[in-house]
Image (tube, grey):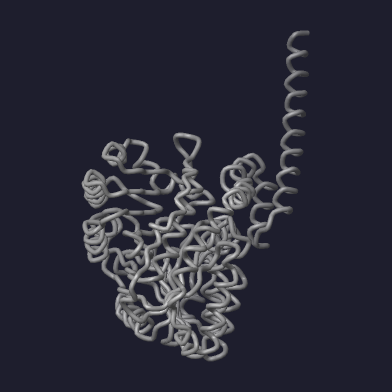
Amino acid sequence: MLEGLLGFLAAYWHVLLAARVVLQTGSVALAILSERREPAATVAWLMTVTFLPVVGIIAYYVLARTRFRRQFRTRAQVNQQADQALSMYVQERLEHFDQSALRRLNHTQQSLIALAANSEQFRGGGPPFGGNSVELFFNPSRKYQALKDAIRSARSHIHLEYYIFRGDGIGSALRDLLVERAKAGIEVRLLYDGIGSLYTYRRGFFDALRAAGGEAAAFLPPRFARIIERVNFRNHRKIAVIDGAVGFVGGMNVGDEHLGLKPHVGRWRDSHVRIEGPAVAELQRIFLTDWLFTTDQRLAEPRFFPQLPQPGDELVQIVSSGPDCPWPTIQQLYFQAITTATEQVAIATPYFVPDRSMLAALETAALRGVDVRVMLPSKTDLRIVTSAARSYYEELLEAGVRIFEYHDGFLHSKTIAVDGRYGSVGSANMDIRSFTLNFEVSAFVHSQEFAKKLHRQFETDMKSTVEIDADAFRRRPRLRKFGQSVAQLLSGVL
């Protein structure tokens, strides 16, 4: 009798558990359908929770649930007054801007600037700034040296914001320099991502900086001791602002791999820019709003936005995007830049998981006769992402897009150069995650000299690539093609 009762209870428990899974699956499916996502991402998540309900539901709550979106929007409303104050200081720096610089641009460039500037009310794009000097870095060691020189020359404050800040050789050297400057009375603030720098700050790496009087804060740290690295809503920006006068932005984090010191990674190819002049005010504003979001410290003070000379003649527009903005501003700028190009588009990106709009832009430009070139690494740290990227090759090649895979180490550069007239260097990859889920920033520089430098570096990098041949790629093994197709189905959640 007892055995029968236990059997009944076990069967009853299994029925309850199955019913719970069905109800939870339906609830999650409704939540997915109600959220603003790309159709491909929606389909991918629906398939995952339907065919792998337990794994899918857990993955959804860990990776995809957009509850933070509401938090971002609420915080944006709460902090509106402070954000308006920061914007006011930025706008004041435009008083001496020479409007003739805009008039010298063609209609395409003017419309691109307007697109970013009109999203300013959503904290997406800043106004254009003239009178800047811009220095490009393609060599990480030169960038680190320039950053250290700027930190040593600081007289007021140092603001750093990085997705990854490792506790290795270069990370320790930079931290020690920050400690030295903090002891000298310089205000030092370091913002690092709670996932990208997880294993660095959990072992007390930044305690020495705090003890010296500096400040360090984690952006959205995880709730659990261990968590999957690729989660949503990460602060993927790489920003440095020194005294509100010198700024750095681009693709380089802080870690020995950038110096080629990790054999399994090899040589690291990346791009970064040093900006001196009025455009630094927008980088400062982005840092201070991110700092406010993370620490609740309101630092909307005029001293962080000094009146600056105009050391050059470069027109720079700093553009940011993230889940707190209803528009994917950086994606929109890429889309417009590609669709309005008349001669050439050269794109370098380590991760390539485009949505249909970006694919259409690339293919349409190539079919119009524009020389469209995309450079990607031959392998990444995530094989499924590499497979997903290659799943798009065939249709791009058929449209006339030229694809190059970089073999001399790891290509981490995130750049675009258009028609020899303007270009961009930033933190955003050409993938759905960067365009819609991460906090990103890019510097768009409307300068023929800047665009030519990007193009020359692209041609130099081409010497270390293999161009993908359309016929040969079409004949790839069926099993590999199948794997790439599966990876493409999951591209919306990568």
Q: Residue furthest top?
A: 1
Q: Nearer the viewer, residue 21 or 257?
A: 257
Residue 341 sits above or below residue 242 on the image = below
Q: Nearer the viewer, residue 410 or 224?
A: 224
Residue 311 lies left or right of residue 16; in this view the side is left
Residue 466 sits above or below residue 195 on the image = below
Q: Nearer the viewer, residue 253 or 5?
A: 253
Q: Can residue 376 be seen in this snapshot?
A: no
Residue at 32%, 59% (x, y): give it: 243
Q: Position of residue 388 (x, y in %)?
A: 52, 63
Q: Position of residue 92 (x, y in %)?
A: 47, 68
Quarter of the image containing the N terminus?
top right
Quarter of the image containing the C terminus?
bottom right
Which quadrant of the figure has residue 111?
Answer: bottom right
Q: Position of residue 284 (x, y in %)?
A: 42, 60
Residue at 31%, 43% (x, y): give it: 214
Residue at 65%, 52% (x, y): give it: 45
Q: Nearer the viewer, residue 407 or 203?
A: 203
Q: Can residue 212 be seen in this snapshot?
A: yes
Residue 286 sits above or below residue 221 on the image = below
Q: How many marks?
A: 0
Q: Position of residue 311 (x, y in %)?
A: 31, 76
Residue 262 lies left or right of residue 454; in this view the side is left
